[in-house]
Image: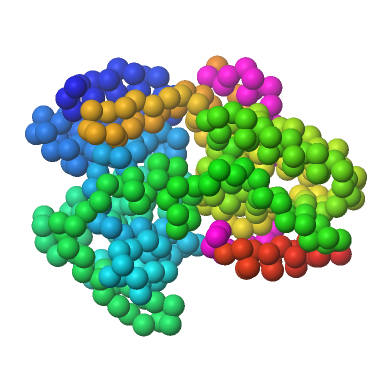
Amino acid sequence: MSMIEDLKRIERLVLPTDPSFRAIDIEEMDRHINDVRQNALATEKDAFLLSLMRLLALPGNGHTRLIPNHAISVLPLRFVTVGTAVRLLGVPTDFDASTGSELVSINDFPVSEIEDAASPFLAGTRQRKRVIGPILFAWPSALVRLGVCSENGPIKYQMRDQTGRLIELVPDWKNRVPGSSLYPRNEHGKSEVTWPHGTFLEIKDFGRHGLLMVLPSFFDPGETMLANAIDEASELARSRPSTPLLIDIRGNTGGNFFKALPLIDAISEGGEDRRVGVIVDKFTFSAAIVFVAILKHRLGARLRLIGEEMGDDLTFFAEGGAIDLSTDGAVARYSSAFHDWAQGRIDETTPRAIAKEIVAVGKLELDCRWIAAAQDREARDLFCREFLADLQS
């Protein structure tokens, strides 16, 4: 199958089906379709992928997007946005000293300028763009398209290490690795590419202060491990009905929120004096956001939200499906259903089972802003102990 056939499939199956495109001006859509077509006819794979990213990003709906990770080659550098800073979390051994450093510029272009130039290619909210955008910093073809470097020209990264010292990295343009080896399809923000590591629940008991439950994912291809984890967490929540709880869903990119409903029930059935905190970040998406929304609806002021803004708003389009393209693994993700957990609205595209659960929660405002590396357990445990103590005061 050719790239032009890929475009035809998207024109036939995605654009008419995905309700998020209904608000896009026809002339604007046609202009971007033509750009994709020209790159397809020229058999310029990376240019085709980038123009398709631009087309699918038009609705601003994060669930509708092109995922190029498996189809591209990148420099062996794993960039991740921590807070608002882009940091280098994975490097070859000859660049080990720069691990954890902050990206300042590329070829003297400040990161903020590159992010602005990249924004039209990235779908969703500002926070989601911070999640999916860093792959562009390691993808030479994207840097060429963004005007940061010339074809086969040098790429100079200026970094700031943890002492404030500026350092330069100039990797070999030809030394590349598969994009998916450093950038997972569902970006979670951790240094490890593969996550979670076979666990769907971590429990930390702080005694009289309370309990921490870490739920890293609601997606379980095997359909048993998540269910068992939710059952264990639910049983524990019911066994200690007045114990304060902290639930950490940072990096939880979603899955099936119906699987998590038993835990919501167990928490909601606790004593009226129970206080609950949920820790979220920009890598919290989809079903994990729905989990927070329903819990907020049930608990009201008894729930406190901690961390940073999540990766999506409460109004979005989801469900749908994906099309595998001919370009060695790129995936076109599209939506089919309307969700509105802000005002509790549904429409003809909302599946009946989801419509029954939709509630209006207004806004999910942060009660406490806190950002730390998800894998830093020492910092997490110190914060959790102090926050649980504060919940009881």
- Residue at 40%, 41% in the rendered image: 185
Is residue 2 depicted above or below 175 in this figure? Answer: above
**For residue 379, side relative to residue 232 (left or right):** left
Position of the C terminus by quadrant:
bottom right
Q: How is the image coloured?
A: rainbow
Which region of the structure is painted magenta? Answer: 349-375
- Residue nearest the observer in this picture, 144 or 259: 259
Question: Splitting the image into 4 quarters, where does residue 287 fall?
Answer: top right
Number of numbered discs overlaid on the protein picture? 0
Image side of residue 183 versus residue 52, left or right = right
Q: Is residue 193 magenta?
A: no
Residue 281 position in % (x across, y down): 56, 53
> Residue at coordinates 11% horizontally, 55% vertically from top-left?
151
Give the residue at x 47% y 61%: 82
Q: Is residue 141 visible?
A: yes
Quarter of the image with the N terminus is top left
Residue 335 in which image quadrant: top left
Q: Tell me which secondary structure the magenta stretch mostly adopts.
A: loop
Q: Is residue 374 above or below residue 162?
A: above
Q: Is residue 368 magenta?
A: yes
Look at 58% across and 51% down and name the residue there: 250
Residue 42 at x, y percent in the picture: 9, 34
- Location of residue 40 by image quarter: top left
- State left or right for residue 337 relative to residue 368: left
How far from the left and from the top, in percent, is residue 317? Answer: 50, 30
In this picture, residue 357 sits left or right of residue 273: left
Q: Do we see residue 297 in this rendering?
A: no
Q: Is residue 180 above or below residue 287?
A: below
